[in-house]
Amino acid sequence: MSNKTFTLGESLYDYMLSVSLREPDILRRLREETARDPMARMQIAPEQGQFMALLVQLVNARNLLEIGVFTGYSTLWMALAVPEDAHLVACDISKEWTAVGRRYWAEAGKDRLIDLRIGPALETMEGLLADGQAEGFDFIFIDADKENYDAYYDRALRLVRKGGLILIDNTLWSGAVADPAIQDRDTRAIRALNQRLHTDERVVLSLLPVADGLTLVMKR
Ligand code: SAM
Ligand code: CA
């Protein structure tokens, strides 16, 4: 016996979903539409969306920031978990992908609380800081281009309030981070950030083997 996290087999994974997943119909339909996109694997898994929605409610998030929207599936999980007076700044460079999400956000009646910013996320984050929004966010989800992960984390740590959460996606990167033979840019960027987080005393840290690895960072 060991208390290590173990990889779920197909049947246990299905069982887990069968007794825990509560994916609203609108999110299921958005996921099914996204599945027809060749890049569909970029979308978070439904159980991760549900977990993030729980965290959003746990920290009572009113001001949220998402870096990497794609077709807006993770965005909508978060938007469905917040009260009507919440505000979610969603950053992406793609008008085409986010246009899919915008249809579903409107159908869900959540489009008014989602503030989509098309453009490089680093510029949007710098703009928020310049605009006096340091420590103005309760919840930040980082899931865009991996090469910029370190830079996103820097800005996110300035934008999040004390006690607020930063979630960083894909921190296990299909296992590539643990294989020294793999040295592409994305893998090296994620590995470097993981290393940096480990010794960053400004935050409370947990890397969960949820989906492709989800790191939870709480600002002290
Ligand atoms: N969170 C989304 C979900 O669960 O469905 C998935 C996001 S996907 C992994 C990454 C997204 O980052 C893509 O939609 C891509 O257009 C966007 N992206 C890539 N480079 C970016 C940049 N420099 N600034 C903002 N968004 C960027
Ligand atoms: Ca991801």
Image (cartoon, grey):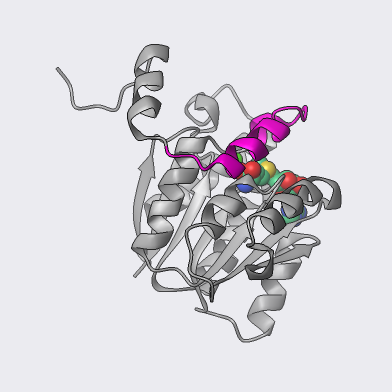
Residue 82 as seen in the image, left or right of residue 182 = left
Question: In the image shown, does 27 or 202 lie closer to the viewer?
Answer: 27
Is 181 within the magenta? no
Q: Start and end of the magenta stretch?
A: 22-42
User: Looking at the picture, how far across and down is residue 193, in whole percent?
Assistant: 52, 49
Q: Main secondary structure of the magenta part?
A: helix
Question: In the image shown, does 96 or 120 lie closer to the viewer?
Answer: 96
Instruction: State whether residue 200 appears in this view.
Output: no
- Quarter of the image that includes the C terminus: bottom left
User: Looking at the picture, how far across and down is residue 39, in whole percent?
Assistant: 74, 31
Name the residue furthest right.
96
Question: In the image shown, does 202 or 13 lie closer to the viewer?
Answer: 13
Name the residue furthest left.
1
- Quarter of the image that includes the N terminus: top left
- View quadrant of ligand 2: top right
Which residue occupies 79% across, 45% down? 97
Q: In the picture, residue 163 is in which quadrant?
A: bottom left
Which residue occupies 67% across, 85% down? 131
User: Looking at the picture, how far across and down is residue 130, in whole percent?
Assistant: 68, 83
Is 41 within the magenta? yes
Residue 56 as seen in the image, left or right of residue 102 = left
Which residue occupies 48% across, 64% down? 82
